[in-house]
Amino acid sequence: MPVLPHRRTCRQGFTLLELLIVCLLISISLGLAIPSLRQSLVTDQLAAGSRKCISLIRSGRSMAARENVPYIIRFDPVNRTVWYEPAEIVDEEETSAEATTPLRSSVTLPDTVRIQKIQQANAGDKHNPEKEGLWISRQGYMDKTMIQLVDADNNSINLLIAPFLHRIQILDQPVDFP
């Protein structure tokens, strides 16, 4: 006689009540997590833009010291682009021909991030770093500078460039130079 397989008498699966409770718990946890997740995605764009700027500035300072040539960091607020180039190829007449100048290194900020303000400690009223750029000496030194990056929700990150060190501080509040 063939042996019939043992039939299970208990039913496998979940009850409707168990499924509803699990769905309720998942929806509550998502409701609590989505605002912080949204905020982290927004600030990630701002942090990514600041990391790009920091790495470009460090690279420009290292390049100037290595080649013993002064460099200029330029900003294009319309295209949200930051780049550096040797200072010798840039003079007063060539500032309109920036598009034809070969770029040494450039970064483009994320779509939601823009440069709000650039302020130098020793610049005074005569020098506009947003139009004229930031000068890097042959040794890689820069004036003490604050660059403020802002996203679409007006969250900001401020980069404070030290003059003689290659250290760049990230601050929550902008710095006003006397």
Image (tube, grey):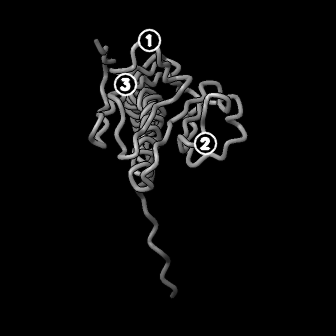
Q: Secondary structure at mark 3?
A: strand
**Residue 89 visible at all:** yes
Q: Earlier in the sequence, mark 2 or mark 3?
A: 2
**Residue 24 visible at all:** no
Position in image of residue 119 (x %, y %): 40, 20
Front residue of 109/142: it is 142
Tell me the distance, in whole angstroms, between the alpha carbons under discs 1 and 2.
25 Å
Find the residue positioned furthest to the bottom.
1
Tell me the distance, in whole angstroms, between the alpha carbons under discs 2 and 3.
26 Å
Q: What amino acid does circle 1 point to?
A: Asp
Q: Decide: few, some or many residues near mark 1? Use Cα within 10 Å; few <14, some 14-19, many ≥20.
A: few
User: Which residue bears the numbered disc 2?
Assistant: 89
Q: What amino acid does circle 2 point to?
A: Ile
Tell me the distance, in whole angstroms, between the alpha carbons under discs 1 and 3.
15 Å
Position in image of residue 123 (x %, y %): 39, 19
Residue 92 shown left or right of residue 154 in the figure:
right
Q: Decide: few, some or many residues near mark 2? Use Cα within 10 Å; few <14, some 14-19, many ≥20.
A: few
User: Which residue bears the numbered disc 1?
Assistant: 125
Q: Mark 1, mark 3: which one is toward the viewer?
A: 1
User: Which residue bears the numbered disc 3?
Assistant: 146
